[in-house]
Image (cartoon, rainbow, N blue to C red):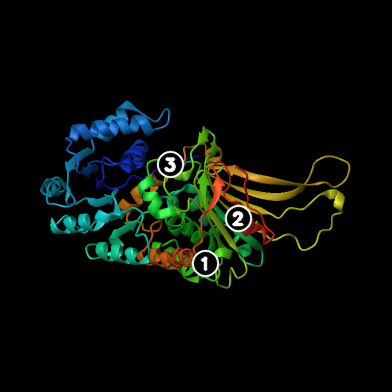
Amino acid sequence: MSSQIIPVEPFDYVVFGGTGDLAERKLLPALYHRQLDGQLTDPTRIIGASRSVLSHEEYRKFATDALKEHLKKGEYDEAQVKIFTDRLFYVPVDAKSDNGWDQLKALLDEGKERVRAFYLAVAPGIFGDISEKIRDHKLITKTTRIVVEKPIGRDLASALELNDTIGKVFKEEQIFRIDHYLGKETVQNLMALRFANTLYEPLWNSSYIDHIQITVAESVGLESRAGYYDKAGALRDMVQNHILQLLCLVAMEVPPSMNAEAVRDEKLKVLRALKPINPGNVEKMTVRGQYKAGASAGGAVKGYLEELEGGVSNTETFVAIKAEINNWRWAGVPFYIRTGKRMAGRMSEIVITFKPIPHSIFDEAAGRIAANQLIIRLQPDEGVKQSLMIKDPGPGGMRLRNVSLDMTFAEAFNARSADAYERLLLDVVRNNQTLFMRRDEVEAAWRWVDPILKSWEAVNQQVQAYTAGTWGPSQAIALIERDGRTWHEVI
């Protein structure tokens, strides 16, 4: 069974950074997949823009090579690639000068009536420059949107400044702050599980839930991001955006509708209810880690400092936090969050652990009764798993066993799981802001994260070493086990 594919109205997508890594690996393949499914309608165009001097044909060759490299086996179709690349155009543009902007305007003026989206797949330092050039060259129409990639600042002050800069040019309803995690099928299914079933929502509170874990683990190291990452670290790179957005979707109250503003209002309430972490409790509530040399699936790997080519760095490649939400629904329920690089596997999941039964009627011979868990897997195999206690089949008395009701989306629906960017790119065209961050959300997240960064500095909290290919430093295990709980680590 497959979902109904609804074509979208013709649009012009201008990708600043059109020859960059994000465009090559994600944006162009995502738009190609929408072409395959029949969602792109004529005369839709995708326009690459960057400082590189290329012709339209040279850009089409770049895109063809990108598709050959990054599509999975069987997805490259010569006829469809030809149709797709015929939609591609290119304009050399300089964000710091007026070079190329008149050519871009002339190209866009051929389709003034279409939805017009500008995707800033560039460094945040030039978001403002590009926004102002778009305004100065009169490229903004009634149906114009702008898409902004993370990071939205490196602290609260810079986030406020960046939002102000873009906000001087575009209205808030035109700004789409993208977090690709929110486009994942499983993330949206979290809302379906909660709000389309009577089974879970009555139990979704401190009376029935013991604790919640959110893990986003990566097996890779720095790759090509050393310069950025050493100035950011895991807290800025992953927690402030991806993980806090997941936490909001787990913890938010039921919105009155799926309207974008209604959903984002409820997420904002969660961010504002997070218990502050300060110098007085930061060492108890957080752990910072940094990987050292070890082994991964591909063999021996270098440590973080070696990947930086020597030197000293106190940047965290791992962070674990015990977060608490000060409201009626979640009082007393800890949210354990962790993320790191060079961990034992690539895995993103949300684990809701329910409270144990209040009294067992079974004798010891029946075995230990495990608490029920709902596991929402974002990657690598998107799906949902519910653990239950049942009787082990066969004669000879009552023997209890913990088993899982397991649904993997690829198997259940016999269909390819769409990449998050596919959905989000076309949500921009449809003007659907539900899965994008509002300005006050971004700033509320920084208001919680900023004091953690400052507290680490105030108490001089050092990174703890962990061996590459493990689940992080031992201190992270202690963080949860001193509460009588343990991390869920099944790959």
Residue drawn at (14%, 58%) of the image: 136
Q: Is residue 48 left or right of residue 361?
A: left
- Give the mark nearer the N terminus: 1 vs 3: 1
**Relative height, residue 394 to residue 182 (above, below):** above
Q: Which mark is residue 475?
A: 2
Q: Secondary structure at mark 1?
A: loop
Q: Which mark is residue 312?
A: none
Residue drawn at (24%, 62%) of the image: 170
Q: CA distance from mark 2 to mark 1?
A: 33 Å
Q: Secondary structure at mark 2?
A: helix
Q: Secondary structure at mark 3?
A: helix
Q: CA distance from mark 2 to mark 3?
A: 24 Å
Q: CA distance from mark 1 to mark 3?
A: 43 Å
Q: Is residue 480 left or right of residue 378?
A: right
Mark 1, residue position: 253
Foreground label between 1 and 3: 3
Name the residue type under label 2. Answer: Gln
Depth check: give the residue in front, 338 or 330. 338
In terms of image quadrants, where is residue 320? bottom right
**Relative height, residue 161 to residue 5 (above, below):** below
Mark 3, residue position: 307
Percent position of residue 9, x then y: 28, 48
Q: Is residue 109 left or right of residue 191?
A: left
Percent position of residue 480, x then y: 63, 58
Quadrant position of the C terminus in the picture:
top right
Percent position of residue 192, x then y: 52, 55
Percent position of residue 174, x then y: 28, 60
Residue drawn at (39%, 47%) of the image: 423
Q: How many marks?
A: 3
Name the residue type under label 3. Answer: Glu
